[in-house]
Amino acid sequence: MAELETLAAPVRAWLGRAWDYMGGLLPEAGTAPPVGPAAARKLLVKPALAGLAASLAISLGAAQPSSPFAAWKKPGAWFFGTSSASPPGGPLLALVAVYGGMLVLGKTWYGLTRTLAARPGVPLKGVAWVMALWVLPILVAPPLFSRDLYSYAAQGEMVSHHISPYEYGPSVIGANAYSDLVDPLWGNAAAPYGPLFLGAAGVVTRLTAHDELATVVGMRLLAVLGVALLAVSVPKLARRFGRDPALAFTLAVLNPITLLHLVGGGHNDALMVGLLVAGLTLAKLDRPVLGIVACSLAAAVKVPALLGVVYIGWEWLGPGVEWRQRLRPLLTAGLVSLAVLAGLARVTGLGWGWLLALGTPGTVRSLLAPATAIGVGLGNLAHLVGVGPSPSTYLTLARGAGLAVAAALAAGLLWASERIGSTRAIGLSLLGFVVLGPVVQPWYLAWGLILLAPVATGRLRVLIIWLSVAAASIRLPGERLMFDELGRASPGSLVVALLVLAAIPSTPLASWGRRLLERLRQPAAT
């Protein structure tokens, strides 16, 4: 044991130094007087324009006919950018535009969080205008980095024809404009989404007169609705905890994951998280029943949002209550939630089949998920040496163990929620289920990161920034193509591309904030 302690001491020291370094990357909020309206406008104009330029670059790069970043390049997949003709520069232009735009966006967002942390009191309206500028080009761009929007549209078409997506995959509707654009991986897969989302998808399909592209746009607008709920709820939640609402808004809503994946990719996680945060905010504002209803609606999009119902029931009687006294309101919250879900199952006519399809995402072997990577590794090793059960058994056991650990972590956080804060506990619990779950997608991390934003300070805030920038840029469909294109490119094109990408990190995108802060800190002349 002494030897282990000796070996562990340098590791603990290194982790401590890294943690302290992270804490120094961002100033603590409230270190300076609030910013006036005129100064706030000066403070926001440059990040607004820099972020707009970054979003334009990403959108234009994704819209190139040879770009790998738009979800699908089949004819009819979007209003533009699906031509077979390739402009000069080919995919290399798209790669530089998208990766360069993401670098600029990430650095601008980080610089803005530093500035707002040092100078609280920037009007929320100003940051909302920044959001509008950043998101507008992404709304025009084709679906980014994923074909999920096309799956949603096809599932809506199935619902509009009274075909249950819980029993059949989109291929059941035959070869048409909807099914042709669905990723073949999900062509025969049942939908794991709740009745609220699929019912809404069916309504969108009918409202768009079964036009495939119009349906895709409508499904993306549902994601925008979820982000709008975040834009309203996150600042209110931040004020409830005495945090700066503009900084919380920037961390959650201007987050690259929110912009590029939830809006650009149109994932229904946006609607789930928007309803979940709205429900938790209502509960914090002493409207627990409405909060439970909103969280139940979120769970009727994706089931992890039920965690919000648990926390509202747990906290219903206020602080300082023994656990036995919490059981009755917890049961009441569960019954209210069950009634909401049952009503949705009845109204939409979709029933409860979604609960049986919750394992559908697990058909993908995402090696980003530690449990899946361990299961695959152990299974391959056992198969190589010819011992033990089948590789699939190892995968099942590893995934089950990961979920069990995540559940134990969530239970511990619930028990400690009064000490560490319930919003922080929910955010960490959701991150635990994502990291230890069978599949890790970049946009899944938004579940926990967005919930942590209204209460994040110091190191936790830096952790949100690091994870967000990393998650927004991993597993992009153009990663392999980028290296292939760099290998095939002409020397001149290669030099230009590398110079552009290398120059972006050294651009003074954040220096404007530091210079302006210094000027604002100086006392006014009398």
Image: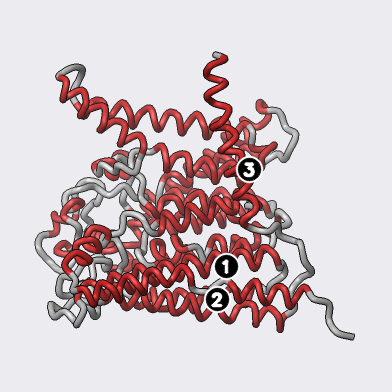
Q: Residue at x 79, y 69 (%)?
A: 33
Image disc number at residue 61 = none
12 above or below 22?
Answer: above
Is there any visible trace of residue 450 in the rendered image? Answer: yes
Q: Residue at x 24, y 51 (%)?
A: 164
User: Could you tell me residue 180's position as x and y percent?
Assistant: 14, 64
User: Could you tell me residue 509's position as x and y percent?
Assistant: 53, 74
70 above or below 37?
Answer: above
Image disc number at residue 47 = 2
User: Could you tell me residue 69's position as x and y percent?
Assistant: 27, 66
Residue position marked by numbered label 1 in the rendering: 111
Q: Residue furthest left?
A: 175
Question: In which quarter of the view is residue 310 placed?
Answer: top right
Q: Which badge, 2 or 1, is on the more N-terminal residue?
A: 2
Q: Amino acid at mark 1?
A: Gly
Is 222 on the left or on the right of 24, as rendered? left
Q: Amino acid at mark 2?
A: Pro
Name the secondary structure under disc 2.
helix
Q: Nearer the viewer, mark 3 or mark 1?
A: 1
Residues at discs 3 and 1 in contact (Cβ within 8 Å): no
Name the secondary structure under disc 1.
helix
489 or 397: which is nearer to us? Answer: 489
Residue position marked by numbered label 3 in the rendering: 422
Q: Nearer the viewer, mark 2 or mark 3?
A: 2
Q: Residue furthest right?
A: 526
Q: In whole angstroms, how far apart are the C-alphas of marks 3 and 1?
A: 29 Å
Is there any visible trace of residue 215 in the rendered image? Answer: no
Q: Which badge, 2 or 3, is on the more N-terminal residue?
A: 2
Is 34 on the left or on the right of 64, as rendered? right
371 above or below 258?
Answer: above
